[in-house]
Structures are given as structure tokens and as C-alpha cells.
Amino acid sequence: MFGFSHAAYESAYRLKTPDKEFDTEKDAYDFYNKYAAYVDFSVKKHNGHYKNKQIIDRVFACSCEGNRKDDKSNDDVKRPRAQTRKQDEDPNFSYAIQVDIDDTVTNIFWSDARMKIDYGHFGDVVCFDTTYRKNKEGRPFALFAGVNHHKQTTIFGDALLYDETTKTFEWLFQSFAKAMPREEPITIPTDDDPAMAKALASSWPKTYHRLCVWHMYKNATKHLSHVFDEYKSFT
């Protein structure tokens, strides 16, 4: 026998549609499609049972029926889900995507072949910066950067982040390390961010964490402006 799911039956009952049974799956599917078109929703095949390789019953449901199971991790932890299909087309290109429990993209990291080669040569010191916020939501755009043998800035990896929490930084540093052809950098200068410092200590414990000179100078001009004004040679 073939019939509605419970939710569909309740809707049918409200429309005074009689409870029905069908001889074939096709008859049930055609009837359900007509009902779905009447109340404006789409149909999907749900679970069914087979006997001697022949289907004996089938449940049809609204395409939106069913909820994702509760996430077992901490509410603040976003669940990483590995994505490798682009990567299959170009093995030298790496990326990672993190989604939340609703499958909404939260964080994205990527690095191409040129970036990996540069990191192999010049990755002893990596500068990490998240001060770029160009989109209207103000989400951080992060850069892993360094300097090559011509004293030119070179990029090792990029990321679009949802926030700047310790969990996000831990995911990013681990994704970066997995994508690169060598170990973590010897030294990484960053701004004075407690969440970033905590993530570095747990993800890259062997890497020396230092504060970026540019950020130090910026803070100095902010907090010691009266000294700069009074003593011109202080800089």
C-alpha cells in the first residue's frame, strides 16, 4: 500500500480529502503531486519497504520535511566540513570551507600553487592580518603574507571569516597548515588580539608569536600622542 506521510495526511484531512490507498507507487505519486500543486509545495520520496526486490509501500513527503539532528558540539563551535571537489580538478589548489549546523558557510580559506611555492621558499616568517573589511557586513578578510628575496610582499593564503573568535582562528591556522608543503612558520607577527594569541598557542605551539611593528607604532601614536607632539625626535 502507498500513502501520505502523517504531516501530509493532516493537511489532506483539513481539505476534507479522504484517506486513500493506492495499488501502485505511480498512482500514489500522481495523486500526491496533484495535491501538492493545489496547496503549493513540492514533493519528495521518503522511506519505503521492499520484498523480493519489489516495493511494497512508500511514504511521500513535502520536500521541506525533516530537521537536521542536533549538533553534539558546543553551541559556539562551528562544524567543519571538508570540501575537496575543486581540489580534485587542480591538486595544486587547496581550499577549506566551514559551515554551521544549518549548512550556512561561515569561513573560507584558499591557497593556489604559486602561494604554496612561495611559502616553501619564504615561509619562515608569516605575517597574519585581518584588518581588511570591505564588504557591507564588515566581515574580516584575512591574509597570510611574507617577503620574498626581492623584498616584495608575497601572499601565502587568503581567507574570508565570519568572526574573529578563538575557534575561527584555530580552524584557519589548522587549515593553512594542512594546505602548505612545509611545517608551520618559525615566526608569525600579528596584532595584539587575545583570541588570535590563544589560537596560535594551541594550533602552532612551536611558532614564535610576535607583535607587528606597524600595530605597535599605531598604538604608540594613539596612546603617546602628547609625547610625539612635544618631542619631534621621539619617532
Image (tube, rainbow, N blue to C red):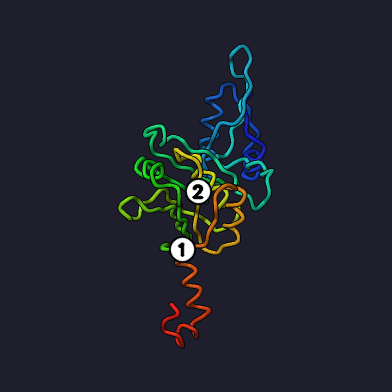
- Position of residue 172 measured from the top left corner of the image (x, y, whole percent): 52, 48
Which amino acid, mark 2? Ile
Residue 100, relative to residue 217: is it above or below?
A: above
Which amino acid, mark 1? Thr
Residue 163, numbered circle: none
Q: Quadrant of the C terminus?
A: bottom left
- In the rendered image, the residue lying farthest to the left is 150
Residue pictured at 60% horizontal, 58% vertical: 195
Residue pictured at 50% horizontal, 54% vertical: 188
- In the rendered image, the residue lying farthest to the bottom is 230
Residue 215, relative to residue 5: is it above or below?
A: below
Q: Quadrant of the N terminus?
A: top right
- Position of residue 114 measured from the top left corner of the image (x, y, whole percent): 34, 43
Front residue of 174 and 106: 174
* Residue under label 2: 186
Front residue of 160 and 2: 160
Q: Tell me if 76 is positioned left or right of 134 in this view.
A: right
Which of the marked residues, 1 or 2, is nearer the chain's N terminus? 1
Q: Tell me if 139 is positioned left or right of 206 in this view.
A: left
Q: Nearer the viewer, mark 1 or mark 2?
A: 2
Categorize mark 1 by other alpha carbons within 10 Å: few (<14), some (14-19), many (20+).
few
Residue pictured at 45% horizontal, 42% vertical: 95
* Residue under label 1: 131
Front residue of 102 and 233: 233
Q: Are marks 1 and 2 in contact (CB under 8 Å)?
A: no
Categorize mark 2 by other alpha carbons within 10 Å: few (<14), some (14-19), many (20+).
some
Residue pictured at 38% horizontal, 51% vertical: 155
- Position of residue 123 measured from the top left corner of the image (x, y, whole percent): 43, 47
Q: In the structure shown, which secondary structural element does the residue marked by tag 1 occupy?
A: strand
- Position of residue 162 measured from the top left corner of the image (x, y, whole percent): 52, 56
- Label 1 and label 2: CA atoms lie apart by 23 Å
